Each structure stands twice: as structure tokens, then as C-alpha cells.
Amino acid sequence: MSATAPARIGVFTGTRAEYGLLRPVLTRLEASARLEAVLIVSGTHLSERHGATVSEIEADGRTIAARIPVPLAGDDGVSVANDMAAVLAGAAVAYAELKLDAVMILGDRTEALAAAAAAVPLGLPILHLEGGHRTAGAVDDAARHAITKLAALHFTAAEPYSRRIVQMGEAAGRVFTVGATGVDNLVAFGRASRAEVAVMLGLAPDGLEPGFVVVTFHPETLAATSTEAQIAAFLKGLATVEGRKIVITLPNADAGARAVRAALKAFADERPDQVLTFESLGARRYAAALTACDAVVGNSSSGVIEAPAAGTPSVNVGERQSGRLKPPSVIDCANRPDAVAAALKQALDPIFRTAARHQPAPFGDGRAAERIVEVLERTDFSGLARKPFVDMAPGSN
């Protein structure tokens, strides 16, 4: 990088959810005179079976510098590992050809780990967003911490997450508590009414009356029970929702996701007047739905991060998100039909919903992307990939 040329920041995205969280950062990078965003797209974005969500990126008017296709042949462990191998090989070639100064990776998915691993032999510094979380019920936990140990700079959603990263031997001066970028989206898009969301989803203005819940359920990859048993128990509890529409977003390409997708679609087919399913809502429609719905239900991270920021009650089912910080508006419950039904009843209670609307903002003020780019604008990327390991002082644990 010359003294005047902007630093080229590769931004990797492999799923719809991850891209939605990266949107505010990309917007800030694109407005910077010192930094240049170089977008690298892979994973389910390029899969017709998963909604070809690359179209959402193109609709935003963004230039895609590289596309890394992956097989997505199955959702068993071997297929996921093969997908990781394709991402690693493709990302390494893309990074080298694009002459990057750093690569930005958000979160904890297996394709994100592969994208991070590809940067290591190239000496590319990794900029990691949303590290430090704990999700004891999913393999994502190991992937997230592995990316943390590969990364040169860390941008977290909350101070306890920053402390955890420092505990892992990372230098405190390389860890920045900025807030969650999902909150940035909520602030930028503002609140929506049910009628506005209905029109966004292609319905009549009264199509979501008298109210609705948003549902996202992913396989709990470290659970002792089968994926089929997980989704069956969840849907028995969800079936107790009456007098409200149910808007379901289908899961990403995790191990076991096909069984979840099939069960959700069958559930919707049995209730055509109540249930709607979508491959992806996209960042804008999803943010609008979060602010207008009566509750968020399932085991997605959005239920414990974005939903509380929107002031919306959420029911967090099972152990997939176990270990994350959760404000009072999040109701944890076991993945049993009776427990899911009871938690839904509590979440939909008017008194609880009012309390959720007035809780303090838990994950920042909507300026996470601004803070991230401010740090990057004053960063010298040369040699940044070489980092220390900071040992804890004796007795400090």
C-alpha cells in the first residue's frame, strides 16, 4: 500500500444473515477516503436452493470482486467439511489476486473459519467482528474462538466479550468494544408498522393482522437429540400460537438443516392461512419485521441481540445460544413442547411486551460501524498479522 492509496479491505460474506450485519460497515467503508471495501461472496449466497441471496447484495448496488462457489451437496459433517475446503482454496486465490491489505470476517460459521484460515499463509491480517460470545449448544462456538486466535484486530458487541478475548491471550490494545452492527441496522431503518411489513412481504396491508411472530430455528449441532426430534418438539410448542400469523425464515446450510427446512415447510403447508415461509427477508425487511412483530421465537442469535435492541420479546429455545449475554426480554426455555408453549404465552403477555419495549439498549447505540471504520482508518496494516500472545499474570485467574 502506498502512502496515498486506500487500504484494500476484503470483506467476506457467506450467508444472508452475515451480509445483513456487514451492511452498515460496508456503507462506512465505501464512504471512507482511506479504506476501500473489496467484497468477496461465497456460501449460500450463490445457491439457488437457498434463495440465491447474492441478489440482495446486487440490489444494494455493490460491486462483487470475487465469487467463491461451494458444493453444498449435503448437510452432514463430511459435506460441511468439503464446503469449508472449497471456501479455503477459493478465498486464498481471491485474496492473492485482489492484493488485499486485510480481510474482514464476521461471526462464527464454518465458512467464516475457512475464510480466516485462508488468510493465514498469506500473512493477511484478519479483522474479526462479533468475537467473544459463547454458544455452548453449537459447533459455532469452537469456530468463533478459532477465528479469534487467528485474528489481528477484534471488534466486539459488549465489554464482557472483550474481556473474554483478552483472557484468550489477545492484546487489550487490539480489542475494541463497539456494539453490535445489527443495532446499526435497526437505528438506520427505524421502526415499521404491521401494515408496512405486510406490504414489504407482498401481502395486503392487513395481511399480518391482528399480529405476528417471527420464527427462525437452526439445528442445534451439539445436541444429544437428532435434528428431526429437535424440530418436531419445537413445532409442537409453536403450534399453540393462535390468533396471530407466523412468519418463518428458513435456516442456513448447517449440518442437519435439510430436516429442519422440510419440517418447517410441512408445518406451513398444514396452516396456509396462518404461516408464511421465506428463504430470506434481507436486512431491511428483517429489521422491519423485528420492530413490528409481537415476539421472536427460535434459536437464532438475532433473538438475543437484535430483538432486544428492537424492544421485542423473544423466546430462546434450547441450548444453541447458551452462554450469550441475554437481557430481560429474552425468555430461555427447554426445547420441549410444553416449555415452548409456556414461554410463548409469557412473551405475548401485554405486560411483558411493554417491559421489553422499555428496557435499556443492551448492545450499543447504533454506531458500531462508525467506530469500526474509525479504528481502521488510523491502523497501519503492514505487519499487523504478527501479534503477541499475552500471558495472564500469576494468580490473576
Image (cartoon, rainbow, N blue to C red):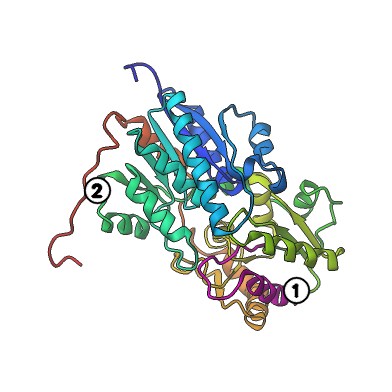
User: In the shown orientation, is residue 29 left or right of residue 297?
Assistant: left
Inspect the image, locate mark 2, and give the three-letter code of the amino acid beneath it: Ala
Q: Which residues are magenta?
A: 215-240
Residue under label 1: 241
Q: Which of the 4 image quarters holds residue 5? A: top left
When the figure is inspected, residue 386 is found, relative to residue 180, above or below; the finding is above
Residue under label 2: 171
Q: Which of the 4 image quarters holds residue 290? A: bottom right
Locate residue 243, reporting x and y percent.
81, 71
Q: Quadrant of the N terminus?
A: top left
In-front residue for pair 193/16:
16
Q: Is residue 233 magenta?
A: yes
Locate residue 43, reporting x and y percent.
59, 43
**Residue 54 can be seen in this image:** yes
Q: Earlier in the sequence, mark 2 or mark 1?
A: 2
Disc 2 + disc 1, Cβ < 8 Å: no
When the figure is inspected, residue 254 is found, relative to residue 340, above or below; the finding is above
Question: What is the crowding at mark 1: few (fewer than 14 residues within 10 Å), some, or many (at least 20)?
Answer: some
Q: Which of the 4 image quarters holds residue 158? A: bottom left
